[in-house]
Image (cartoon, rainbow, N blue to C red):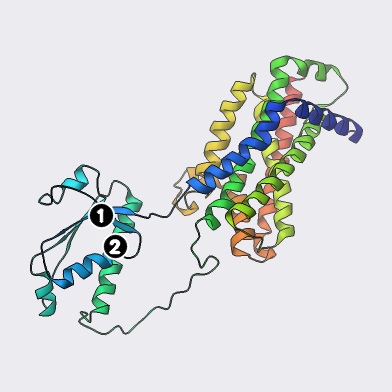
Amino acid sequence: MKLGRIYAQAIKEIAQFRRDKLTVALAFGLPVLALLLYGYATRLESKDIPVAVQNYDSGALSREYVDTIFANGQLTPARWGNRADSIGPLDLGLAKATIIVPPEFSRHLKQGLPAPVAVVIDATDVNNARVIKNSVLATTKYFCRTHDLGTSPNLISAQLRLWFNPGRKEAQYVAPGAVAVILWIFPCLLAALAMARENEQGTMLQLYASSLSSFELVMGKASAYVAIALAMSVLLIVLAIVLFGISIVGDFPIFLLSLVLYENCAIAFGLMVGAKSSTQSVAVQAVATAGFTTALLLSGFIYPLRNITFPLSLISTILPARYFVESCRDVFVRGSDAASQLFIPVALGLFAFVVLLRAAGLLKKMQLPG
């Protein structure tokens, strides 16, 4: 292996990249657009869930109870016409739950008698159903406590304090994860297209006829596109800091090392996919299926890792995006110490090494006998 050949190949790749305006747009324009879409459109916290209320009591306590239900911002009154049909709003999709306040609700409470409230919840969306259930239970408990309706004193009280993200800003959670996913998808796609283009246009045969080895070819392409990916990373991180108000609170050297290794993983995976693809369209489909889908669904960006069931959980353990999502959220939100994050660059470095060797091996098998 000669470093001069690798350097020459890297310079050649960067020159080709600069000449192709569409590829430049793919490298810097689409990632910015994706960051805006993920950052502003992705909302994991349920808010303004429509709930219908059927109040058969005319007392002041029932009206206060209903007002308390909608005071926290998670639930909002649903508009519906036929007040006699309590299930109608659920059937029509106008509400996600119906709360039925019985007659004599206020009088029973004043007399210390039970006053059960019926809550019918649409459980089609399990997360929404859980949010509605917990919200109604918490609100009912608060209402009873503030009106001295409890039958026994509260012997234990919990003093809650939100840590890391006290303002409950969802962008603090979404934006770092979005950066991690985007920095996997687009560098991977660029590398796959570059390698598949060589196969599609037949220029790979010229490379095979030269004295360039398969490993030198892979390292040259990888070096060029890692440099491009790092420039993309700087752009996205700066935009995320400016637009979503995140800041660096964790160990930055460990994050920087993880970032470099992560981009090597993405480029190596893209080169491996491109080496097996006969055309650029095949490369795009392969990256979309094996790269984008897994990074989006199995990395912990949207769904907690503990919710990923077997055997998909096995794929998650070898997915580089899974580790870098954690690294991004740590450096921008949690701010853990370096020792707790050392396993991330180790895992990413191992993955990049294995996949780079695999990509070089694929090219060596395709190489013409010498």
Q: Position of residue 63 (x, y in %)?
A: 19, 67
Residue type of the residue flagged with mark 1: Val
Closest to the observer: 11 or 80?
80
Vertical relation: 368 (above or below) 299: above
Left/right of residue 240 with respect to residue 349 in the rendered view:
left
Q: Is residue 248 visible?
A: yes
Which label sits on residue 70?
A: 2
Which label sits on residue 68?
A: none
Quadrant location of residue 181? top right
Residue drawn at point x = 74 percent, y = 53 percent: 257
Other residues around mark 1 within 10 Å, as few (<14) / some (14–19) / many (≥20): many
Report the residue marked by disc 1: 51
Residue drawn at point x = 67 percent, y = 66 percent: 337
Split into 4 quadrants, where in the image is the C terminus? top right
Q: Position of residue 348 (x, y in %)?
A: 68, 48
Vertical relation: 28 (above or below) 162: above
Residue drawn at point x = 60 percent, y = 42 percent: 182
Closest to the observer: 186 or 21?
21
Q: Is residue 270 visible?
A: no
**Mark 2 or mark 1, earlier in chain:** 1
Other residues around mark 2 within 10 Å, as few (<14) / some (14–19) / many (≥20): some
